[in-house]
Amino acid sequence: MFNGEPQTARPIRWAMVGGGRGSQIGYSHRAAALRDRGFALVAGAFDIDPARGRDFGVGLGLDPARCYSDYQALFAGEAARPDGIEAVSIATPNNTHFPIAKAALEAGLHVVCEKPLCFTVAEAEALQRLAEARGRVVGVTYGYAGYPMIEQARAMVARGDLGAIRLVNLQFAHGFHNTAVELDSPSTRWRVDPRFAGPSYVLGDIGTHPLYLSQVIAPELKIARLLCARQSFVASRAPLEDNAMTLMQYEGGAFGTVWSSAVNAGATHSQKVRIVGAKASLEWWDEHPNQLSFEVQGEPARVLDRGMAYLHPDALALDHISSGHAEGLFEAWANLYRSFAIAMEATDRGDAARLATLRYPGIAAGVAGVRWVETCVRSADAGGVWVDYG
Amino acid sequence: MFNGEPQTARPIRWAMVGGGRGSQIGYSHRAAALRDRGFALVAGAFDIDPARGRDFGVGLGLDPARCYSDYQALFAGEAARPDGIEAVSIATPNNTHFPIAKAALEAGLHVVCEKPLCFTVAEAEALQRLAEARGRVVGVTYGYAGYPMIEQARAMVARGDLGAIRLVNLQFAHGFHNTAVELDSPSTRWRVDPRFAGPSYVLGDIGTHPLYLSQVIAPELKIARLLCARQSFVASRAPLEDNAMTLMQYEGGAFGTVWSSAVNAGATHSQKVRIVGAKASLEWWDEHPNQLSFEVQGEPARVLDRGMAYLHPDALALDHISSGHAEGLFEAWANLYRSFAIAMEATDRGDAARLATLRYPGIAAGVAGVRWVETCVRSADAGGVWVDYG
Amino acid sequence: MFNGEPQTARPIRWAMVGGGRGSQIGYSHRAAALRDRGFALVAGAFDIDPARGRDFGVGLGLDPARCYSDYQALFAGEAARPDGIEAVSIATPNNTHFPIAKAALEAGLHVVCEKPLCFTVAEAEALQRLAEARGRVVGVTYGYAGYPMIEQARAMVARGDLGAIRLVNLQFAHGFHNTAVELDSPSTRWRVDPRFAGPSYVLGDIGTHPLYLSQVIAPELKIARLLCARQSFVASRAPLEDNAMTLMQYEGGAFGTVWSSAVNAGATHSQKVRIVGAKASLEWWDEHPNQLSFEVQGEPARVLDRGMAYLHPDALALDHISSGHAEGLFEAWANLYRSFAIAMEATDRGDAARLATLRYPGIAAGVAGVRWVETCVRSADAGGVWVDYG
Amino acid sequence: MFNGEPQTARPIRWAMVGGGRGSQIGYSHRAAALRDRGFALVAGAFDIDPARGRDFGVGLGLDPARCYSDYQALFAGEAARPDGIEAVSIATPNNTHFPIAKAALEAGLHVVCEKPLCFTVAEAEALQRLAEARGRVVGVTYGYAGYPMIEQARAMVARGDLGAIRLVNLQFAHGFHNTAVELDSPSTRWRVDPRFAGPSYVLGDIGTHPLYLSQVIAPELKIARLLCARQSFVASRAPLEDNAMTLMQYEGGAFGTVWSSAVNAGATHSQKVRIVGAKASLEWWDEHPNQLSFEVQGEPARVLDRGMAYLHPDALALDHISSGHAEGLFEAWANLYRSFAIAMEATDRGDAARLATLRYPGIAAGVAGVRWVETCVRSADAGGVWVDYG
């Protein structure tokens, strides 16, 4: 169990681009980064409106001089300081992720970026090459991956509790956008506009979340080909989809599905991951993240509870409090950011051994998500046909 | 609420083919048919072993002379009696359904038949023509359709509680056959042998159940084209599948999926129907059949309970006991058989008005199921491609 | 698994007193008794209105001459016939149970009686002595006891899966009578009138159900003393209670509670039994009767499912269909009536060995329920104080 | 929704007594207090071992000079500084709460204290008088009260959604101490030793949590008399109980129960609150704190979800993230500490209007908890009899 004692020699000097007043995701980043002193917020370009962004930053206790008008000014200003930032988190609309991340890496900064990392595999691979060339960490906020029960699922699959994996059933299917709510909601509006959101809505916005979880839990599965059908039930969203079904044929015979939806009326989140093996199945639901269902064929169904001594040590290491007490998404994000901090520090001191022990959504995860969305769109736009993957 | 008072002038004289000792489904037929005196069991050809079948029939109180060695003898023997049977139920392996049903109709009998009705649409349509020509009822035991909450779902969709239907998510995905249990289980063995089971295993054995429920609940939906991918995770079952995913594009834009599986390790039944409309969703799970989830976007999720006064009168009419008491599959089957009896009696007296008020799985439902399986197999065997329906 | 084959040499000739048109419980008795041919309905005094009762009986296929005007006429008329009834079920308001049961036993009949058996322990013990003297079976319809998962719970406690029993938490707490519904509901009216209902409402009407289940599951527990507080939240029901909490100190140190309520607004049934042992707990809920929760301290919680091979053979013997299919209260009642039939037949032929193998709610269970209610009322009326039991 | 923007003019200078290395609750306090900059940790006496406490404090970034050996040194040392602490949190074993809180108040500090505040009502009232005399805030960490759905429940009861409250069913009944785990667990050992734990174990350790929630949700209910039966199923714990049942008769006729247990084998937390009114019921379970069940008699059961627009504004104001994302206990504690900070600041500037808008567990809640435990023990030790309250 984690109790707040320092995991790094000192907090990493850190800034945010975006995530200012009115941003929900901004708070998630700060609450995670600052929680256990892995990072210290020292600068930011929080808002497209510089004055509002400065006011926001000052409210958070920042030096007004380090509240910048935009990311270029941020990177330049901080580079000029002896105590300048070492890392930056990007919490802006999708279309800006690529240029900001590129500029940050070029400025020698470690990066944490919202998903999707960018719009095309070509861009994503460019970022990957850049990060490798500069020796910088890129963390991608697939925040659900920080939940202890996801780590438990990974450990159980790894030790063979399920037998050979046969089926992967994934969904993230909420109902909040069953009507054209974007007419009144700026935070939804850009998500359904291809100029800002890229080539997809729900595939990239939510479908990649359970996809990444499946890659954490069953990393040996490689998609061989996939097929995607997508729909725009609110017609004004076309060509972007508000519902999609993706079939995935894995190498070796396993089969998977991903249901991505924003029109699943009445559902709150409905992010679920079910992994079916030859002997047993696991199922996890993000609305009740402290439980993991484990069903061995021919035995009573079991519910595993976070924090219990029967869990794998790797899962228990992610706890912040003992069993029975509900943990939530903020702890999951805090676990991610803790790994980011440790990875950044280990990278800075060239500690390959430490890096080898870490599991977190890095640049490869970011590339993989972009590839999946791009391939889904290619299949869907060809009429929902099978296309080779990779 | 139904309380056992007679629904027909007298019980219909009835026989079974198959369903003898060791048959689970046989008891379901008898418990349903005999429960409320819609039928009287007077004859049978219960077993492929005539002596064992006779012993079984006598144990049920039958005249030994009316325990026949096979269906031909049954139909011939009864036709020769003034008090001969009027209806017969067929509970034999799939490959025999067609010849027995055909012979029964030709003998002028009403028929209740297990699904699938037969192996090909051509056969199914032949039975349909024969039934129409002879003016006989054919009931197909899609037993889950007799649950009151399915009727409630139908009524809610009909009155627009969900708005326009957008998505239909269906599954019947158990795990009982995750290994080659057929090696030791005769009742499974024939199901995975195409000589006895026909062109599919799980598509026809279980997938058609939630499919039929969706047709009851949302009858306006017409499949325009579908795509099916099927797998044989227990390799010895090939070419029959033990897992399949079917995508359905409906006319008008709605989209559906059916997950049929016998290898969903650890799942007991997992038959679920979710109908998503523009405003709200319904979800039903056959392991807890007395509840129906109703989720209106933007309102608290609701759980409707069987027997409550807020339900539709058509649902309440199917109850056998007041709310809170668990009803089960036997009541659902009893509701089906009650409709069969009323339909047979009304047919016999030419009462078209009464027939018009009845909803039950008849010959059209039987044909529809065969068509769906046949089309799924056609798609799957072509590599999982879209094929036009109908 | 039970499949309908005969359990007795022939059906027992059987009648009902009460349970006519408009009676819900009457159908439960008939559906259970007639289901598998343990009984044949040949006579009845179904209704306080003789003409309506005769009409009802004839509708069920009875000889009009055997549809009697009251129980005295029934017992006398049948005694005069060579093919007269051998057993009778009593489904009338509480205040008539004692005289009818007494008359039936004196007429040499086996009896099935609704609970409560009568109003006082003195009456109950008189019936017990009479039944023993006449060598007749008295079955009491604690119908929930027929569920297979109750038998499973009993077997698990017996083999020590829970360790020493420490706590018994019982409740039957519905909300249907949260207002004075008796003003418009005759079937509720007599239940809150002490002339017809006896000294209690919810304690006797529903509280005795989970109490009996606890006695089946943990028969070694003996109440040493109890305390009961009761309330009449709908004031016009006083002195009868619509809510009660009973504490029970068992011999040996275990502790129990029973919450009986008809004013638990919004609850459908909420009959739950939780048994806590030194090592593990069991929990069962009658609205989902096919599942049994089993929680071993320090292990993942388990849900046991009816019909699975891992269950105790005594539980599996009560199944009517394989796992995954929902069974309901009618199967539980059918199991009770099957035991009643076997017990009556074994009694008639003096087969003590067969009787020793049967577990069913008999006269002792009836007496125990009356004793519990009487003791609760004594405690409550003394101000909710501890009173010795027995 | 709360997004981390400052709620107070500046962070309050804050210290902890106890809560050092190995303390789970210490992290809960720090994570809550520091999360949104209501407090700044500047000093502490974290450990009974001064060196270990200093090492711990330095690891958290403190000045070694402000890591004190004990609370007396802390209060004296900080009083001598111009930038000394303004508030202190007490996270030590129960027996030390009273002297430390007393000393803190006498030092003019605001106090946050673990429950129970102390061992006797006399002590509690002395603290209350002292706090009032000094004009200092005392917050008591009934952390579950910070959950938004508790606020929602309060608002619903206040506006009459349930009708008059009739029943309050409370439980906190885990199974972690079903055996004598204290033999190997120091953190459990002191809890079952009356020298450190006071006059009760589970009543004070956990029973007061749901009790306080019921007081938040239904503040108009006043206990008139109560009865408690307590047991020591692990005999070595006597006279302290590991299980207790408390009955509460409220003024005006409502009735309540509290089940407190550490031997409910297999249960993880099982803290549940059910409030039954004349029209409807509410139920909340702390293991799934983002949901609230709302059951109106005669209507489908509803599940309310945190963050949805249909909730009361006072509940929505406590959110940290939008609906569907799981919040956990850390957010609830953060809400408590945010209120503490606002209350302390408002107190310091004499802002009675601001104070009047705040709801948080203060000194009165602390006194009430002590009174309830003391009264329960008095009843239990007299043989489980009714005793007047207050």
Image (tube, coloured by chain):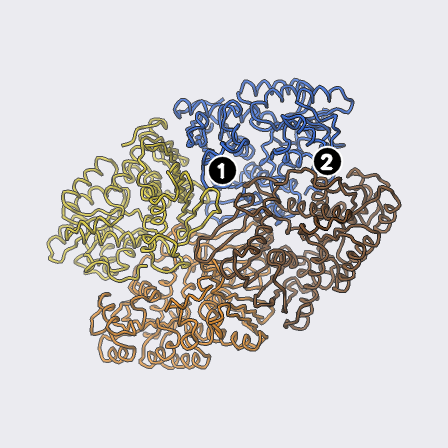
Chain colours: A brown, B orange, C yellow, D blue
Residue D296 at what x, y percent from top left? 49, 45
Q: Secondary structure at mark 1?
A: loop
Chain letter of disc 2 in the image: D
Residue C9 quadrant: bottom left
Residue B368 at what x, y percent from top left? 47, 74
| The furthest residue to the right | A80
As displayed, is residue B63 above or below residue B6?
Answer: below
Q: Amino acid at mark 2?
A: Arg
Query: Of the numbered discs in the image, which one, if any, rests on residue D176?
Result: 1
Q: Secondary structure at mark 2?
A: loop
Can you say which quadrant of the picture contains the N terminus of chain D?
top right
As displayed, is residue A226 above or below residue C370?
Answer: below
> What is the C-alpha distance between the residues marked 1 and 2?
35 Å
Residue D345 visible in the current orientation: no
Apparent side of residue C45 relative to residue D18 in the rendered image (left or right):
left
Chain letter of disc 1 in the image: D
Residue C374 quadrant: top left
Image point (54%, 41%), residue name: A324
Which residue, given by chain and number where applicable, does mark 2 sit on? D37
Residue B320 at what x, y percent from top left? 36, 56
Q: Amino acid at mark 1?
A: Phe
> Within 10 Å of the Cα at label 2, are there few (<14), some (14-19), or many (20+) other Cα atoms?
many
As displayed, is residue C280 above or below residue B351?
Answer: above
C199 or D195, which lies in front? D195
Query: Of the numbered discs in the image, which one, if any, rests on residue B119?
Result: none
